Image (cartoon, coloured by chain):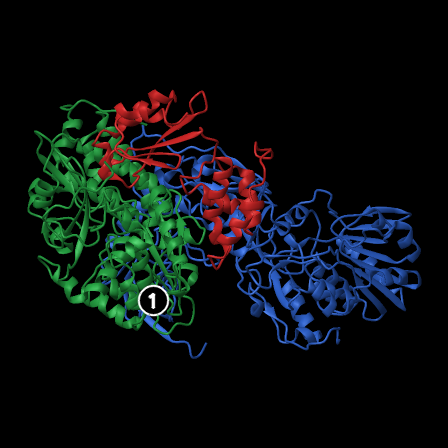
Amino acid sequence: MHETTAQEPVFTGERRERLVTILQRYPTKRAALLPALWMVQEAHGWISDGAMAEVAQVLDLTPAYVKGVVTFYTMYHQHPVGKYFIQVCTTTPCNICGAEKVAEAFLQATGCAELGATSPDGRFTVIEVECLGACGFATPVLINDDFIDGVTPEGVRELLARYP
Amino acid sequence: MVDQELVTCTIDGVEVSVPKGTTILEAAKQAGVLVPHYCYHPGLPVAGVCRMCLVEVEGVPKLQIGCATNVVDGQAILVNESRQAKEARKGVLEFLLINHPLDCPICDQAGECELQNYVFQEGRSRTRYTPTFAKRFNPVEDFGGDILYVPNRCILCTRCVRFMEHAVEEPILNVSERGDRAFIGVHPDHGLDHPWSGNVVDLCPVGSLLSKDFLHKARAWELDHTPSVCTGCSQGCNVNLDTRAQAVVRVRPRPNLDVNRYFICDHGRMTYRDMNRGDRLEAPLLRDAGELTAVDWDHALARAAQIVKGSTGKAVILATPFASNEALYLARRVLERFQVTAAFRADRVDGEHPLAGVPGLAVRGERAPNVAGATLLGYRDAFGDALGAIEGAALVLILGDSLDGVNRAQLEQAGNVIYLGTTLPEAARAARVVVPATNVAEEDGTFVNRDRRVQRYLQAKPGPGMARPAWWILGELAVELGLGDPLGSADEAFDELVEATHAFRGLSYRQLGVRGAVLPEGAGAGVTA
Amino acid sequence: MGYPHAPHDKETVVLSRYFGDAEARTYDGWTKRGGYQALEQALGTDPQVVTDAVKASGLRGRGGAGFPAGVKWDFMPKQKSKPHYLCCNADESEPGTFKDREIMRWTPHALIEGCAITAHAIRAETVYVYIRGEFTEPIRIMQAALDEAYKRGVLGKNAMGTGVPIDVYIHRGAGAYICGEETALMNSIEGRRGNPRIRPPFPAAVGVFGMPTTINNVETLTSVLHIITHGAEWYKGLSLSNPKSTGTKLMSVCGHVARPGNYEITMGFPMQDLIYEMCGGMRQGRALKAVIPGGSSVPLLNREEAEGCVLDYEGVVAAGSMLGSGGMIVFDDSADLVYQMMRIAKFYAHESCAQCTQCREGTAWTVRILQKILAGQGEMQDIDLLLDLGEQMTGKTICVLSDSCAAPVGSAIKKFPLEFEAYIKGARRPVAALA
């Protein structure tokens, strides 16, 4: 039904153990939902409807409940994204320092047709993100888990060379 | 209750005293002031999100939400008298409409829509939303079960989500996404097919959640609403029958905190279909020379009386637990001379479907409304035995459509059969007298639910042709038999029942009102007359 | 950039003393610098005494609201009948604010120590440090420090060997500004959508998991350990103006200044000196136009107001805005305030949780009107409409997100009306917004 039936279950082996450890931190199972969703994203790169159902089952929740939570938090990907997910802050403090030019430079350098789209080679997805909390170091960019600040349009190509 | 601490406040100048802990919104109801609201519903936990119930509390700088703010003693609260509060509500209404498609002409909710009502009552006459701005658009979605979701009309009040989460305790609905992109969502693996999910349609204050069954069937203003009792099971949920052009088109819950609070199950909602059957008996029939021939009531009643008078000894009553207490009582009354075997049969299914968050409320396995009443009135749940007793019986009275699985030959052996029913099943053709009775939507009467609550149901539409309520038919038969005076109404039939039946002692229609009354404990079964 | 600058002479380095000092990140480095002595001292003291000290110090919440920290702690039940929780708000998401990030990056043990002291003061055995999901580096550093702290016996069932149980866990957010609102943060920890809750009940009565809870900002909690070390009187003495504003404040300065960054000032410090001396003033050839002084949620100050503004809670209010989280966005005369207000409104429209009508619809509507003005299609009545929507969006919702959208936009319209009119009257070329 969804493209997820083929995905391997997430909560087996080592990840299952990690989840058990995480559960001990909270008085309710539900509280482990955000950490569990992070683990799904770490395993699959995004969170499919099938994975949401798995999380629901593991934490005694309903799939719809889990989906409501997933869709609230913008860092959870509801669709597959490029190998490198690039988030460029373009909120006011960075914006006045030229952040939109940085975003444009990323689009050009990656070949992504538009913000939110994945490049034809599947390597990159570029999005505008609201405030990354590094306003004094415009323009901050998050490439997967790498936080890079002080990015300029001129530095984009060199930076991307580090992400084959 | 006596010791409950009261606080007194004024609401738009009207003084009310309410128990401590009462919200402004509920206190205002008592003062006769409706605080406009969307997300608040007395049967659900408070969300406080629509911000429509903002009211001014004297001395408090910020407006307060009536649904979540408790009344404090001595407070002056302004609802309609506050310019500030009215401006705020006007603002909310304008915001709610900017993404709304304004498609009232094709919306099922039109006429009973709280968005329409409040905008008309106190909204701006014109929006300031630039016409070229895009409106949020999401396609209509089939949520499964009987439910359609029209997201463009949704005001995100979350009543439906809270109902599924806190009353059903199965969160099948969610709020998805955030900001003005938000909508009510489901997971593709799990549709809204829970036995109680139809309530979300009633709870939706706008035309966003719709019943597929009712879709485009009627406009709200064409409907009449008649208080009734659901016949879907022995729970006895209070309902309204919504009728249009002499047909019941919808069954909706009628609040009764002691029985069903604000809810009914989906099974109960579908009971209306039987109320509109096309294959109804419309005239009394007498069997002459092997043929059933239509006659008028005088002839039919005279023949029935003649049969009863001419018989003696054993009689059998095969009744349906869909029959009213009044009919069940009178059936026994007209046969009081006989040695009667009275029985009923109720459909039973395994398992109940409780509404988890509301104790004592479930779709019961016993799928008939008056099992308790029949039992109290001396009918035994032993249909098979009664069928067996037909053979030696001088008279068989069939009350209601209770002949499923009974064949005509069986009844023909009995000879003296009188049949009261809404339809004419094959087996009933064995009767010597067939008389057309009304169904639950076409008569007044009472049922007793499984918790011994006696509840009235009222006539919502006329019966077909010459069909009459069973209590009237049996009352007239009693007159023919010289057993009493004619009954003018179901009310009088009930009074007679009460007088004759210990279990019902002291009750009257007036006392029952529209919420019913519980029979005193320990009242035994059986007719004492 | 991304590195702290060397402290300026006029700074008062308390919290930022070890910024840039990588060794301070480790347990050994931290103890070498006197770390965990305050915790040891606090654990040997009655919780009420710790609370009283913080009350006496005048420390106010550094997350934005400025509520006295000790008073907040005092709301917690004194007789513990169920678990108490401390939540550390490290969801730093307020545009213009980037101080908590630096505290966590450079002095993670200071935050852990502050958390542990506070946990003791409010009788909590569990602390959740809620760090926004985008802070990948601070999360890594904090986790490493926590692992070390457990290993060295600072935390756990027997914290510092005193028998007091204190557990500290990181809870990673996942991209939602509103989770910095304390009740939304609690919902997020509980595994729910980050929706703010209606109050009452307040967190000290019914907080995370329904238990008594205190939520404090990273900077607030880190300040606590210095109050314990040096005493309430010392902290109270750190005030150049109003006795109601005490201690030091990390000011995050960003935008059009020559040297953006975090600057730790004593309460009451003049904004003018911060901008022109510490931050090196405007970029070459540019002049100051406006400052949003407390993160993007507060009214903007024009040049005159900014230059006369005293940086403490009361001083910024007197100037017409709020100190908020201390994130200063500085605009020079090249800034297009109409465009930037649209960006700010867009931020809030993006982050609205969708609960309250005014916020859900109002923030998005505000964006559309501003985009219409920017596109050269605005009418003069749009300005009145923006102000009226702002009125409807202020003081009427569960939390202040919609107020936060209305405040900067409304103040920009009032203080820089000509910029808006220029677009409307065609004096300025239309601008299309990216995305």
Residue situated in front as seen by the camera: C410 or C323: C323
Relative horizontal placement of residue B331, taking residue B120 as reference (left or right): right
Instruction: Give the quadrant of residue B119.
Output: top left
The residue that label 1 is drawn on is C120
**Chain where mark 1 sits:** C
Q: Position of residue C144 (x, y in %)?
A: 38, 49
Of helix, strand and loop, which one carries label 1? helix
**In the rendered image, which quarter contains the C terminus of chain C?**
top left
Three-letter amino acid code at the position of disc 1:
His
Chain C's colour?
green
Can residue B111 be seen at all in this image of the molecule? no
Residue situated in front as seen by the camera: C184 or C126: C126
Relative horizontal placement of residue C338, taking residue B211 as reference (left or right): left
Residue situated in front as seen by the camera: B430 or C357: C357
Q: How many marks?
A: 1
Relative horizontal placement of residue B236, taking residue B338 as reference (left or right): left
Q: Position of residue B465 (x, y in %)?
A: 70, 47
Residue at horizontal 70%, vertical 66%? B373
Instruction: Give the quadrant of residue A95.
Output: top left
**In the rendered image, which quarter contains the N terminus of chain C?**
top left
Q: Would you place residue C429 above or below residue B62 in this image?
A: above
Instruction: Give the farthest residue toward the bottom.
Output: B3
Chain B's colour?
blue
Chain A's colour?
red
